[in-house]
Image (spheres, rainbow, N blue to C red):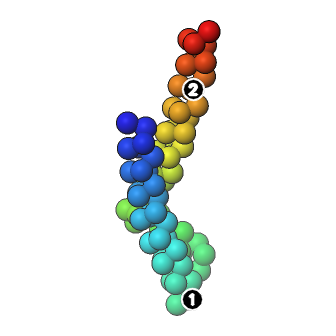
Amino acid sequence: MRIFFLFFGFVLALTGGITLVAYLNLLTVGYSVIEYLLFVAKRVETYLFIIGILMIWLSGILIKRRKKKNQFTKK
């Protein structure tokens, strides 16, 4: 289950991250940094990126907690 969250989170973060980098081309067209951030905040890809990072982070926390829990039960 943790590997599923890790893999799915990676896919979401990769998809969102690539599109956010692609949207950086708006800065060369003439958008200011504030306009870029406002535009990106309205896009679904930004939320996919954030959800993906959170899923990766949470899967890492679950792995660490289970390892600690298993250490105490083995003794």
Q: Position of residue 34 (x, y in %)?
A: 58, 72
- Residue 38 visible (yes or no): no
Query: Type of residue at label 1?
Result: Thr
| 37 relative to 7 in the view: left or right | right
- The disc at residue 28 is 1
Query: Type of residue at label 2?
Result: Lys
At horizontal 57% and vertical 13% (from top left) the residue drawn is 74
Which quadrant, please, contains the N terminus?
top left
- The disc at residue 73 is none
- Against 39, is 52 above or below? above
Q: Nearer the viewer, residue 52 or 8?
A: 8
Q: Nearer the viewer, residue 55 or 29?
A: 55
Query: Mark 2 = which residue?
Result: 67
**Local secondary structure at mark 1:** helix
**Local secondary structure at mark 2:** helix
Q: Position of residue 54 (x, y in %)?
A: 50, 46
